[in-house]
Image: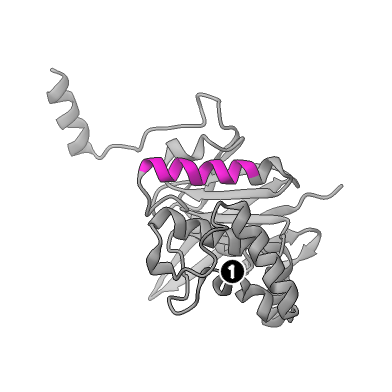
Amino acid sequence: MSALIEFDEVCKYYQMGDTTVKAADHISMKIEKGEFVAIVGQSGSGKSTCMNIIGCLDVPTQGTYLLNGRDVGKMNRNELAAIRNEMLGFIFQQYNLLPKLNLMENVEVPLVYAGVSRAERHKRAKEVLEKVGLGDKLKNKPNQLSGGQQQRVSIARALVRNPPLILADEPTGALDSHTGREVLGMLQELHNEGHTVVLITHDNSIAVQAERIIRLEDGRVVYDGDSHSPEAVVQPTLLPEQESQTEEAQA
């Protein structure tokens, strides 16, 4: 059985003046159906580039990306849009809710683009909003909700087409710690129900909630394994002046 996500020597290069930036540098990895994986790294590590390629928002400069056995790098814009709608549910740090629409209408947006009937849209939107605990707020507008509730709406919107792959980009970044734990618990529930969940984060304490961690540095994979291994979580490298300050504090 083929992996759901398969990178084979994937590279993504950007030209900045005379300099070539290697945002992804020969990345190879496989993510099987039903896994809960965190892709973790600091700013500039390549994790956002990986997310864009996994989410079919961008394609590799070279190398091969197969999503459910299909070669994403050979797709045109319409084909990329179609596979996003079919395969992916996105959860972002910013909720991206439409302020003039109520919760039902916000969650129905992907179904409108998919040409789903009005009655079926209402039914499915109501089901997923109830699933995330907002069944009593169907007619509310986003500005009537807390940040955590708005993120629940974005999760409902990601689920409304029942995609096999959930891609969560820093989903707790704008939330307090308590609400962030609730959102992570919901991602765990989705994983338990059989969804493949890929979590993008810079935060070690968030990453270890997944089963597996893929750590990136400078566009390369430096760790890929069990999230509970001591090697999975590393401390950020200190600059020389920070090291000297730490030594002075310990003296």
Q: Over which residues does the magenta segment extend?
A: 177-189
Q: Is residue 112 magenta?
A: no
Three-letter amino acid code at the position of disc 1: Val
Instruction: Pick whichever, 188 or 49, lies toward us.
Output: 188
**Left or right, residue 153 beside residue 63:** left
Q: Residue 112 sits in which quadrant?
A: bottom right
Instruction: Pick whichever, 6 or 16, lies toward us.
Output: 6
Prevailing SS of the magenta stretch: helix
**Left or right, residue 225 beside residue 117:** left
Residue 44 visible (yes or no)? no
Q: Position of residue 184 (x, y in %)?
A: 52, 43
Instruction: Pick whichever, 3 or 195, lies toward us.
Output: 195
Q: Is residue 181 magenta?
A: yes
**Residue at the spot x=19%, y=28% of the render?**
246
Instruction: Pick whichever, 81 or 131, lies toward us.
Output: 131
Does 199 appear above or below 119? above
Q: Position of residue 208 (x, y in %)?
A: 51, 34
Q: Residue 21 sits in which quadrant?
A: bottom left
Q: Residues within 10 Å of mark 1 (few under 14, many from 20)?
A: many
Q: Which residue is mark 1?
A: 107
Q: Residue 63 sits in which quadrant?
A: bottom right
Q: Position of residue 152 (x, y in %)?
A: 51, 56
**Residue at the spot x=45%, y=46% of the render?**
41
Name the secondary structure under disc 1: helix
Q: Residue furthest right?
A: 1
Q: Residue furthest front?
A: 136
Indicate the colouring scheme.
one colour
Does 235 appear above or below 71? above
**Left or right, residue 139 beside residue 9:** left
Quadrant location of the C terminus in the rendered image: top left
Residue 95 visible (yes or no)? yes
Q: Position of residue 213 (x, y in %)?
A: 57, 38
